[in-house]
Image (cartoon, coloured by chain):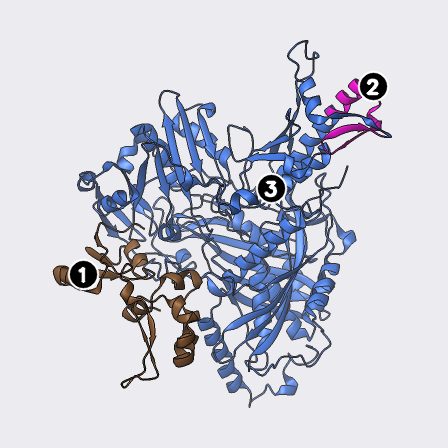
C-alpha cells in the first residue's frame, strides 16, 4: 500500500495552481485534505502523474457571510476549509444548520481536521 | 503466601512506555543498509501457475532481488503441521500445509507467488507490478458444503476430495435419548468468517550478521521460541545462532501464533542470501489475504429435551471451513465440538464434523477458536426449546447447569489438548443470578419498558458459556534478584497487550516482598529464555503465571535460608517486605534483599558446593489439562424495526476466570473481547464472490465496530479457583468474544417478538441489511399463517414465555 511515483507541486496561490493545471491537464490531480485521494493512491486505484497540493493556498480556506445578491443571508465556504472548521462555525450553524448538522457524521474528528469541505463536494465522498 | 499484590488493581508497568510511544514494535526496527520486501500475490483464487518471470522487475530502480519458488531449491518445504490430531477413534485426517511461495497451484487469492527486494518499500511495490505471472484459472471452491460434494474441483490434487478431516465423538447413546424426549428441536445454524483485525498487522525484520554467524529476527509472533527452533532447523543453524525477538505487539488474537507464514520463512533466508537486513510490514490490504482467519461453519444440530427442559441429549453434524490449508490441525473444530456442551449436563452427545478445503485464506484459531460456533449452536437450541416448551430462557439454562458438586465433570470426549474433556471446577448458577440482577431481567414480567417514544423495540438477552483455558504443554520462568534490589523476571511467552509485565510482576513481588514496579519482566526474546511455546489458548496467566510463581517461590526459599544464616535467626522469624528481609519483632535487624544478592555472589571465597551463586531460580509449570473458565453475558438492545439498526444499550459480563491476579487487566481483556464479539455479531463479514474474490478487502468496506458501537461494559467476577494449578488461575484472553453472537441473536429475537413473530436468528454475523431481510421474511410468513391456524392464543411462544 504505497503509491507509485508522482510529481508533486505545492502552489501558494490560486493563480499558480491554475497554471499548473493548465500545464498538466488530465495528468494532474488536486490534493486537498487527502482523506479519499491518498488511500486510493496507496491502493494504487488512483495513479495521478502529478499532484497539485492546495494546502498552502490560504485564500481558499474561509467561511464568510453573504449579505448581498441571490445568496444573501447565506454563507460562502472556501474549498480548502476543513470539515472540522465548518462543523464548529457559529456562522454555519446559524445560516446553514443542515450543513452544521451533517458535518459530525463525516468520519471522526481526526479525519475532519484534515478533510476539506471542497474535497467532500468534489469527490462526493462522503 | 502473601496476597498483597495478587488480586489488586495494580497500574500496569508497561503503560508508560506504551502511552508515551517509546515501546518498540517491529516496524520501529531500523538498521543500516536495510532492504524492504513486497510480495507478488495471486489475483486468482484457484489455478495452475504456468509462468512467473521477474526479469523485468529486477531491472527496476533500486531493485536488489526477485525470488520465486524455483529460486528456493531445497529450502522450499511445506510448512509444519503445528498441531497433530488427537487420537480420536476412526478419525480421517488429511493435513496440507502451505509452502513459502506458490509452486504448481494457487489455492487462494493473495497467496504469495514471488518476492521483490528493493531499497525501499515504494520501489519494491513498483517492481512487484512488473513481475509477470500467468495463471491458468480453475473453478474456485468457495461454498463450504459444495466443497465436499462429489465432483467438486479438487484443491489438493493428491487428495481424492476436499475432505481435510472427518471425526465423530460421542458420549452415551443419543438416539436412545432422543426416543425418550418430549421435544426434539432441529435447526440449521450458520457462522461465517471474519478477520482478526489486530491494530498492528504482522511484520518481520531479519538480520543475518555474516561475521558473527548470527541471525536476529524481529517478528510479530505469539510464539518466538518455536519460531527460533523452526528457523534454526530450516536454515541449518544452531538454535544458539538464531535470536527471535517478539517485541511489543499490537494484538495477537491467534493468527500471530507459530504459523511459519511464508514471510517468516523467507525473510531470514533473504537476509542470509543478500547479507543485508530486510524488513516486511504487512499492510492492511495484504492482511485480508496473508493472515489467517476464522469461523466459517455450517451446523445441522438438534437437541432432545424433556418437557421440564432437562437436556437428554444433543446431536450436531457440522462442516468446518479450513480454507486452502490446515496447518493448525483440528484445534478449531474440536473446540467447537467440546465447547458446545457449555456449562450444562448433557448426558448423551453425538458430534460429527467434516473439515473442508476451500479456495479461501487459511483458517486457524482467532480469539475464541471455534468456541463461538459451539456456544451459538447450544444457546440457540436452548432458546428455541424454551420457546417451544413455554419455559423462560434463563430457567432452561438453570435447570441444566452442572452443580458445584459435579466437578470434576467428565464429558467423555477428547479436548484439543488430547486430554479428556473434564471440567475442573465452576459454579454457574451464582453467575446467572448476578447477571440477571445486574441487567434487571425479570422472567415474570409480562410487560417490559420497551417503548421510549422512538418506535424502537427493546430486547434483553442472557446466555452462558464455558471456555477450556490454559492448556499445556508447559512454560518456564527465571527470577533473579539484582544487586540494586530490583528483580528481573524472564519468561518465554510473547506478549501482545495482555498485561504480562504487570500480572507476572505481581505474582513475583508477593513472594519476594518487593514493589511490582521493581520487577522488570522480560518476555518474547529467545536469547533471554530458551524453553517455551507461546501465548495462545488463554494460557499466559495459567501456564506462564504459575511458572513465574514457582520460580519466585524457589528464590524466596533461598532468600530465607541465606538470610537466616547471616542474621542468625530461624527462617520462620523472617519476613520479606519493602525490599528487605526483617526479623519479626526486631525491626532494626534487617537486610536489603539486594545486599543479600551481592553476598550470594561473592568476589572472594567459594560458593558452597552443591549450591548456585546469586538469588536466582528457574522453574517450569505444565498443567495436566485445561482449566474451565465460564461466564454469563447479558445485554439490553434496541432495534429500529424500520431500518433494522441495532443499538446496544447495556452490556453485562459476569465472569469466572478462577483466582484473579489483577481485576483491571481481566476487565480490559473482557472489554476487548466483547468489542471483538460485537464486531463478529453485527459488523464484520468477509464477502466473497463465487470466484473466490473478496469484495470488501479494506476497512472502508469491512466494518469494524468503533468506540461508539461498543457500550460501556459492566463486569462482575465470580472466583472458583482452579485446582489444576497452585495459583488457581484460569484464562480470560478469549472469553469476552465467545458468547456475543449467541447473545445478540437472542436479544434481537426478544426485541422483535411482536413485530416479527416467529423470527429466528440462525446465522451470525448479521448486519442491518441481513436483519432487515430476516424481519421481512418472518413478517410475510406470519401474515400468511395467521388466518389459518396460529392465532395469538395458540401461539406456542406466548404461554409462559415471560
The residue that disc 3 covers is B13
On the question of residue B405 being in view, the answer is yes
The residue shown at (60%, 63%) is: B712
Mark 3 element type: loop
Looking at the rendered image, the disc whose residue lies closer to the viewer, 1 or 2, is 1
- Magenta segment range? B559-584
* Chain name for mark 3: B
The residue that disc 2 covers is B568
Above or below, B425 relative to B73: below
* Chain name for mark 1: A
Q: Position of residue B351 (x, y in %)?
A: 58, 55
Q: Which chain is brown?
A: A
* Chain name for mark 2: B
Q: What shade has chain B been given?
A: blue
Mark 2 element type: loop
The residue shown at (73%, 46%) is: B721
Q: Position of residue B266 (x, y in %)?
A: 35, 36
Q: Position of residue B225 (x, y in %)?
A: 51, 33
Nearest the camera: B95 or B371? Answer: B371
Residue B457 image label: none
Residue B21 is inside the magenta segment? no
Q: Are marks 2 and 3 on the same chain?
A: yes
Above or below, B311 relative to B232: below
Bin the neighbour count of mark 2 within 10 Å (Cα to Cα): few under 14, some 14-19, many 20 and up: few
On the question of residue B622 being in view, the answer is no
Question: What is the spatial separation of the Cα atoms under label 1 and label 2, in whole angstroms?
Answer: 88 Å
Above or below, A9 relative to B252: below
Looking at the rendered image, the disc whose residue lies closer to the viewer, 3 or 1, is 1
Amino acid at each position: 500500500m504505497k503509491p507509485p511515483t508522482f510529481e508533486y507541486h505545492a502552489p501558494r496561490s490560486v493563480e499558480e495552481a491554475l497554471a499548473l493545471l493548465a500545464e498538466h491537464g488530465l495528468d494532474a490531480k488536486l490534493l486537498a485534505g487527502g482523506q479519499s485521494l491518498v488511500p486510493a493512491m496507496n491502493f494504487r486505484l488512483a495513479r495521478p502523474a502529478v499532484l497539485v497540493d492546495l494546502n498552502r493556498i490560504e485564500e481558499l480556506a474561509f467561511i464568510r457571510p453573504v449579505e448581498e445578491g441571490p445568496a444573501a443571508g447565506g454563507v460562502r465556504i472556501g474549498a480548502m476549509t476543513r470539515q472540522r472548521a465548518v462543523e464548529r462555525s457559529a456562522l454555519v450553524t446559524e445560516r446553514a444548520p443542515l450543513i452544521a448538522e451533517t458535518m459530525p457524521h463525516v468520519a471522526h474528528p481526526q479525519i475532519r481536521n484534515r478533510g476539506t469541505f471542497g474535497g467532500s463536494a468534489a469527490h462526493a465522498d462522503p | 503466601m502473601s496476597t498483597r499484590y495478587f488480586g489488586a488493581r495494580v497500574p500496569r508497568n508497561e503503560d508508560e512506555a506504551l502511552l508515551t510511544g517509546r515501546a518498540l514494535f517491529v516496524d520501529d526496527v531500523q538498521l543500516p543498509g536495510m532492504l524492504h520486501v513486497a510480495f507478488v500475490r495471486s489475483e486468482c483464487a484457484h489455478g495452475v501457475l504456468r509462468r512467473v518471470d521477474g526479469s523485468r522487475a529486477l531491472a527496476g530502480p533500486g531493485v536488489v532481488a526477485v525470488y520465486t519458488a524455483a529460486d528456493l531449491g531445497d529450502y522450499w518445504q511445506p510448512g509444519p503441521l503445528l498441531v497433530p490430531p488427537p487420537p480420536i477413534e476412526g478419525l480421517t485426517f488429511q493435513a496440507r500445509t502451505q509452502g513459502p511461495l506458490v509452486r504448481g497451484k494457487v489455492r487462494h487469492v493473495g497467496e504469495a507467488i514471488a518476492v521483490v527486494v528493493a531499497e525501499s518499500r515504494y520501489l519494491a511495490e513498483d517492481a512487484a507490478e512488473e513481475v509477470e505471472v500467468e495463471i491458468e484459472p480453475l473453478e474456485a471452491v468457495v461454498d463450504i458444503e459444495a466443497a465436499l460434494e462429489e465432483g467438486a474441483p479438487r484443491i489438493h490434487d493428491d487428495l481424492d476430495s476436499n475432505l481435510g478431516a472427518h471425526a465423530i465423538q460421542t458420549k452415551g447413546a443419543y438416539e436412545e435419548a432422543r426416543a425418550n424426549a418430549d421435544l426434539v428441536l432441529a435447526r440449521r445454524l450458520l457462522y461465517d468468517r471474519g478477520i482478526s483485525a489486530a491494530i498492528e498487522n504482522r511484520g518481520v525484520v531479519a538480520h543475518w550478521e555474516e561475521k558473527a554467524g548470527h541471525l536476529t529476527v524481529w517478528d510479530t509472533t505469539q510464539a518466538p521460541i518455536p519460531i527460533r527452533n523452526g528457523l534454526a532447523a530450516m536454515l541449518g543453524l544452531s538454535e544458539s545462532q538464531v535470536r527471535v525477538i517478539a517485541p511489543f505487539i499490537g494484538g495477537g488474537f491467534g493468527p500471530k501464533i507459530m504459523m511459519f507464514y511464508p514471510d517468516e520463512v523467507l525473510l531470514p533466508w533473504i537476509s542470509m542470501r543478500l547479507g543485508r537486513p530486510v524488513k516486511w510490514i504487512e499492510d492492511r490490504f495484504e492482511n485480508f489475504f496473508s493472515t489467517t482467519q476464522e469461523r466459517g461453519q455450517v451446523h445441522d444440530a438438534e437437541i432432545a429435551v424433556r418437557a421440564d427442559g432437562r437436556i437428554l441429549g444433543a446431536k450436531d453434524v457440522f462442516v468446518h471451513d479450513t480454507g486452502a490449508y490446515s496447518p493448525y490441525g483440528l484445534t478449531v473444530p474440536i473446540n467447537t465440538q467440546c465447547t458446545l456442551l457449555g456449562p450444562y449436563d448433557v448426558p448423551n452427545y453425538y458430534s460429527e464434523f467434516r473439515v473442508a478445503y476451500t479456495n479461501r485464506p487459511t483458517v486457524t484459531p482467532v480469539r475464541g477458536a471455534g468456541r463461538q460456533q459451539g456456544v451459538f449452536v447450544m444457546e440457540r437450541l436452548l432458546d428455541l426449546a424454551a420457546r417451544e416448551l413455554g419455559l423462560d430462557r434463563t430457567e432452561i439454562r438453570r435447570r441444566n447447569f452442572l452443580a458445584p458438586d459435579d466437578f470434576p465433570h467428565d464429558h467423555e470426549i477428547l479436548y484439543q489438548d488430547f486430554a479428556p474433556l473434564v471440567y475442573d471446577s465452576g459454579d454457574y448458577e451464582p453467575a446467572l443470578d448476578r447477571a440477571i440482577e445486574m441487567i434487571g431481567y425479570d422472567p415474570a414480567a409480562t410487560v417490559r419498558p420497551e417503548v421510549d417514544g422512538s418506535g424502537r423495540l427493546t430486547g434483553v438477552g442472557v446466555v452462558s458459556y464455558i471456555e477450556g483455558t490454559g492448556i499445556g504443554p508447559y512454560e518456564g520462568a527465571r527470577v533473579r534478584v539484582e544487586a540494586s534490589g530490583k528483580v528481573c523476571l524472564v519468561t518465554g511467552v510473547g506478549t501482545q497487550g495482555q498485561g504480562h509485565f504487570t500480572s507476572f510482576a505481581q505474582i513475583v513481588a508477593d513472594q519476594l516482598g518487593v514493589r511490582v514496579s521493581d520487577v522488570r519482566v522480560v518476555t518474547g526474546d529467545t536469547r533471554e529464555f530458551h524453553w517455551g511455546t507461546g501465548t495462545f489458548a488463554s494460557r499466559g496467566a495459567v501456564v506462564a503465571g504459575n511458572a513465574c510463581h514457582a520460580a519466585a517461590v524457589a528464590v524466596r526459599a533461598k532468600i530465607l535460608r541465606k538470610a537466616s544464616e547471616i542474621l542468625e535467626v530461624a527462617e520462620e522469624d523472617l519476613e520479606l517486605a519493602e525490599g528487605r528481609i526483617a526479623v519479626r519483632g526486631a525491626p532494626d535487624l534487617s537486610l536489603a534483599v539486594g545486599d543479600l544478592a551481592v553476598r550470594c555472589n561473592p568476589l572472594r571465597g567459594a560458593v558452597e558446593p552443591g549450591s548456585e551463586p546469586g538469588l536466582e531460580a528457574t522453574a517450569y509449570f505444565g498443567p495436566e489439562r485445561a482449566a474451565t473458565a465460564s461466564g454469563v453475558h447479558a445485554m439490553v438492545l434496541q432495534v429500529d424495526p424500520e431500518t433494522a439498526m441495532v443499538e446496544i444499550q447495556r452490556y453485562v459480563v459476569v465472569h469466572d476466570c478462577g483466582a484473579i491476579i489483577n481485576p483491571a487487566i481481566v476487565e480490559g481483556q473482557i472489554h476487548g473481547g466483547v468489542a471483538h464479539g460485537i464486531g463478529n455479531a453485527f459488523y464484520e463479514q468477509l464477502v466473497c464472490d463465487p470466484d473466490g474474490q473478496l469484495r470488501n478487502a479494506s476497512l472502508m468496506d469491512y466494518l469494524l465496530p468503533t468506540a461508539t458501537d461498543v457500550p460501556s461494559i459492566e463486569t462482575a467476577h465470580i472466583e472458583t479457583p482452579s485446582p489444576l494449578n497452585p495459583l488457581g488461575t484460569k484464562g480470560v484472553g478469549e472469553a469476552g468474544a465467545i458468547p456475543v453472537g449467541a447473545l445478540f441473536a437472542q436479544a434481537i429475537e426478544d426485541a422483535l417478538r411482536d413485530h416479527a413473530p416467529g423470527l429466528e436468528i440462525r446465522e451470525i454475523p448479521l448486519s442491518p441489511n441481513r436483519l432487515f431481510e430476516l424481519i421481512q421474511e418472518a413478517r410475510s410468513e406470519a401474515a400468511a399463517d395467521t388466518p389459518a391456524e396460529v392465532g395469538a392464543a395458540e401461539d406456542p411462544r406466548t404461554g409462559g414465555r415471560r
